[in-house]
């Protein structure tokens, strides 16, 4: 009976996770494929963001420091975007690519070092 209860709970957790992620773009699990690539990582003066697929000029690219403060906001993205990070403090930064509704399409983290 205990094993059945554990399996039942695991099943509900799995279904809840699958349902919560159903609105995200379909990218094969474990493929490592992203909508955007960024380089260099770590960055010191500039970081470049390039679209791999599904480019939409209405996307918004936002960069946050590790404390959650927005440090950059690019409202009109292009297939290739360059952001000056020379004024950023050393540390980890998070980027989010959002559509017009505010839904996060892609996200990731990069490092700035001096």
Image (tube, rainbow, N blue to C red):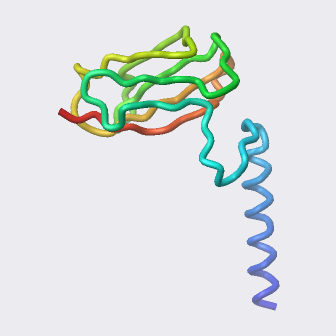
Work out whether residue 89 or residue 44 is closer to the camera in this orientation and state it. 44
Say whether residue 27 is left or right of residue 111: right
- Residue at (51, 20) in percent of width and height: 61
Q: Is the residue 51 above or below the residue 13 in the image?
A: above
- Residue farthest left in this picture: 114
Q: Is residue 14 left or right of residue 32?
A: right
Q: Position of residue 45 (x, y in %)?
A: 26, 22
Query: Closest to the observer: 9 or 19?
Result: 19
- Position of residue 70 relative to residue 7, above or below, is above
Q: Quadrant of the N terminus?
A: bottom right
The quadrant in which the C terminus is found is top left
User: Which residue is found at the position 72% from the left and 38% from the top?
Assistant: 24
Asked whether 12 or 37 is in front, the reply is 37
Q: How many marks?
A: 0
* Residue 111: quarter of image: top left
Q: Farthest residue to the bottom: give it.
A: 1
Q: Write the residue at 69% across / 52% down.
A: 29
On the image, the x and y values in percent for residue 108 come to 49, 38
Q: In terms of image quadrants, where is residue 67? A: top left
In percent of width and height, residue 34 lies at: 60, 37
Residue 77 picture quarter: top right
Q: Is residue 7 above or below residue 75?
A: below
Left or right: residue 16 versus residue 31 is: right
């Amino acid at each position: 009976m205990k094993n059945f209860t554990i399996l039942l709970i695991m099943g509900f957790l799995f279904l809840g996770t699958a349902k919560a992620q159903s609105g995200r773009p379909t990218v094969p699990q474990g493929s490592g494929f992203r909508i955007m690539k960024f380089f260099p990582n770590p960055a010191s003066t500039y970081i470049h963001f390039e679209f791999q697929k599904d480019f939409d000029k209405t996307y918004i690219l936002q960069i946050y420091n590790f404390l959650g403060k927005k440090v950059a906001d690019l409202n009109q993205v292009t297939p290739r975007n360059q952001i000056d990070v020379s004024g950023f403090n050393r540390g980890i930064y998070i980027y989010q690519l959002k559509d017009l509704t505010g839904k996060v399409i892609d996200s990731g983290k990069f490092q700035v070092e001096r």
